[in-house]
Image (cartoon, rainbow, N blue to C red):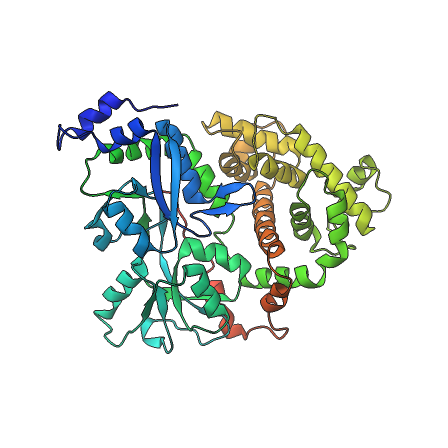
Amino acid sequence: MRLVSIASLLVIGGCNDVKQPSNLAEVLDTGVLKVGTTYGLTNYYNGPSGPVGFEYELADGFANYLGVKLEVFPFYNLSELFPQLANNHINLVAAGITVSPERAQTFTFGPAYQQASEKLVFKQGKEWPRKIEDLNGELVVIADSSHHESLLKVKQNYTQLSWQQTEDKDVEELLEMVLNEDLDYTVADSNILALMRRRHPELAIGFSVSPEQNIAWAVNKNQDDSLLAALIEYFGIIQSNGTLAALEDKYFGHVRNFNYVDTREFIKSVRDILPKFKPWFEQYSGDLDWRLLAAMSYQESHWKPNAKSVTGVRGLMMLTLATAKDMGIKSRLDPEQSIKGGSTYLASILRRIPARIQPPDSTWFALAAYNIGLGHLEDARVLTDRQGGNPDMWVDVKQRLLQLRQKRYYKTTKYGYARGNEAVAYVDNIRRYYDTLVWLDDQPPQILEEQSPSEKGAPINELQPAIENSSTSITAQN
């Protein structure tokens, strides 16, 4: 639905040149919004069911807000992308770019919707560079990137610093070169690095090259402000209605904290243990993704058939005795029966989630209910509604699950006290494991051997970068 009137836009655009149609009026008249971006993990790529990516979904939302068609023009590097905006071949750039002083001289930026800092990255087990003076090797960054600009600033105080720029590699490739020891160091934004470390736990952080910087879309500085005005309106709306927070949670919410040891152990277990149970996960997954079921089982038992908790739940899927009986399971310790029972039980919970709640939120709700119970989940949804949040959005409800441990809140609920924090951590962990499984499933078989860490492990002093830098800032701005 078009929410912006052309008349109001012409008033905005007419301040500079009343004889020329406003920038946004042209978009509305042609019915097409042309957005430039770069290929990448969070920006844009073609998935099995079509285009995906955090930036893509934001841009698609903006096009829908304007009531026009979205056309995405993906490029391989920024040096190709920015001239397209300067020459008016595209309307805006949505590529997760930081707002640096240098870029602000050339482009106009919309509202900041995230923040990220730049991290010096090296391979775990190598000598840990704690400061710029410790660098002793080859450093390569993306050409025309904010990383290059930040290093230029650092060089003012440390003239010995040297690095190379590349237009032939993207940041993911540079990180993989560090892993393969073809390169000593590179620089990556904290949001990208948070996702990459789930796949490659050997990526370690040396130090921050820059403080947190705003991330925003860029528009042509020489155009009128009509498109910018629409951007400000759009981001204001999706911030206030929770859409931005939901998108941010979808792509980044489960990867803020990094656990080096756990990630290494999971990848090792995928190689050594999962093949024993994979056929049953596939057989009994039904309408579920078998990889989600496997990730859930790993969170429950670390794929140990004899696992047992202090509360009496047992087996690969950690079923209670009552649940196993309801699901027709005779032995909770039998791996096949446990997987069948856990899948059947999760599917039954999913059917009880209100139909208006869409995936992936419905899936996260079902996982939380598997852990904490549908009653407590409903209590959290009631609290969410009382407090003005959206009871159908996981990003809002998970905040209220945390409140179920606080007397001032749980005394007003039907089912009372619950360890809601454990349910939130439970869902986040499953999402991380699932993301890793999805990625590994698309890789050649030898990737598991390449990813497998040394059985001896890294020296304890070399684990410090991963531990001390475990908290990654990926903050949606309000």
Number of numbered discs visible in the structure rendering: 0
| Residue 317 shows up from this direction | no
Residue drawn at x 85%, y 46% is 331
- Rendering coords of residue 459 (x, y %): 54, 75
Residue drawn at x 78%, y 43% is 340
Choose top left, top right, bottom left or bottom right for residue 441: bottom right
Q: Does residue 412 appear left or right of residue 332 in this picture?
A: left
Q: Quadrant of the C terminus?
A: top left
Q: Quadrant of the N terminus?
A: top left
- Rendering coords of residue 359 (x, y %): 57, 35
Choose top left, top right, bottom left or bottom right for residue 205: bottom left
Query: What residue occupies the far right of the structure in this picture?
Result: 330
Choose top left, top right, bottom left or bottom right for residue 152: bottom left
Q: Nearer the viewer, residue 34 or 473?
A: 34
Residue drawn at x 43%, y 55% is 192
- Rendering coords of residue 473 (x, y %): 41, 52
Is residue 25 placed above or below 137 in the rendered structure? above
Residue drawn at x 18%, y 25% is 11
- Rendering coords of residue 154 (x, y %): 26, 67
Q: Nearer the viewer, residue 138 or 77?
A: 77
Q: Does residue 304 appear left or right of residue 403 in this picture?
A: right
| Residue 420 shows up from this direction | yes
